[in-house]
Amino acid sequence: MLAYFIRRLLLVIPTFIGITVLVFTITRFVPGGPMERAIAEMQQMSLSQGSSMSSSSLSEDQLAELSAFYGMDKPVWQAYLDWMAKLLQGDLGESTFYQDPVLDLILERLPVSTFYGVCLFLISYGVSIPLGIAKARHHGSWFDNLSSIAIFVGFALPGFVVGILLLTIFSFQLEWFPFGGFVSDDFEDLETLGEQIYEILWHAVLPLLAYAIGDFAILTMTMKNSLMENLSADYVRTAIAKGLPFDRALKQHALRNSLIPIASHFGAVVSVFFAGSFLIEAVFNIDGIGLLGYDAILQRDYPVVMGILVMTSIAMMIGNILSDVCVALVDPRVKFGK
């Protein structure tokens, strides 16, 4: 197993290079980059001052200086090598929109996205697994049918649509929850730790529901279907026929094998710990990495886009390796030999 995971870790390097090369190349050819935005801002300033200006009014030297400032004066391969050299030194560059180091922007918003990622993990697995077991035990009952309807309705709706519905009903009409944000503006004025925790959780209810609706549905139905398949297997039926109680047969035999598909899904959840969700954070105005990436795409802030890509791609690849570890722990039949 150790040799297998060493090979997987080594495979991360060419995979990471392939991902970053592809996205870096795309950013160089997508129209509306930082140079175009800077020229547009200069044109707006000139219009507000009563004069007209176009990109052609800039001299070749000025355009060359502007291109060099944004790193657009080098070939793609050379610019990528320069970016990679800085990355190996822990430098993700400087944002062309915020004019701040990209690493500082990400670290500033990382706790927010990590908070939602951890809560999403606990809610998704803590509720989906028991609910899937209950649905499998009572397959075909009114409880199973009603919960399936609710699950499929939630799965059919995208998370950001659910977020808009939740804001409309519970924030705008009923006024039970705030309209968004991670905390209120007067958070620093709260005196006790309990009040601060309550403030964070009060703001987190609706975003977490919107976050969890997709993974919750997938994990619940995966758990139910996997458990039902194992309960109908010959080894479980034989154990019950020999006198083993149904509950013990479920716990000792069927349940562990049923967790294998759930364990393989673990890697997809890890990336949310660090990346957040672009659209959900935009809907709820949560200042996390997801909203930072969303604004970076709109503003063509490519250093921030590449910095977030570095984090999410590494987190996703490490998450896939952790999924293999979880599968190996759950299923002793898995051998990572030759």
Image (cartoon, helix red, strand yellow):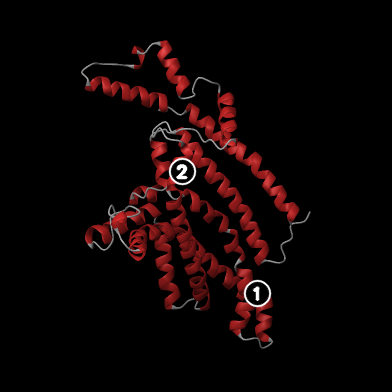
Please identify the quadrant where the C terminus is shown: bottom right
- Which residue carries the number 1 mark? 233
Residue 27 place in picture, x, y as percent = 49, 31
Q: Secondary structure at mark 1?
A: loop
Q: Is residue 79 above or below residue 101?
A: above
Residue 126 place in picture, x, y as percent = 49, 68
Q: Is residue 274 above or below residue 151?
A: above
Q: Earlier in the sequence, mark 2 or mark 1?
A: 2
Task: Tell me which amino acid carries mark 1.
Answer: Ala
**Furthest residue in direction front, as rendered:** 191
- Residue at x 63%, y 53% (from the top left corner): 321
Residue 106 image label: 2
Please identify the quadrant where the N terminus is shown: bottom right
The answer to whether any part of residue 232 appears in the image is no
Q: Quadrant of residue 201?
A: bottom left
Q: Quadrant of residue 187?
A: bottom left
Residue 308 place in picture, x, y as percent = 49, 42
- Front residue (pair 271, 237): 271
Task: Tell me which amino acid carries mark 2.
Answer: Ile
Q: Secondary structure at mark 2?
A: helix
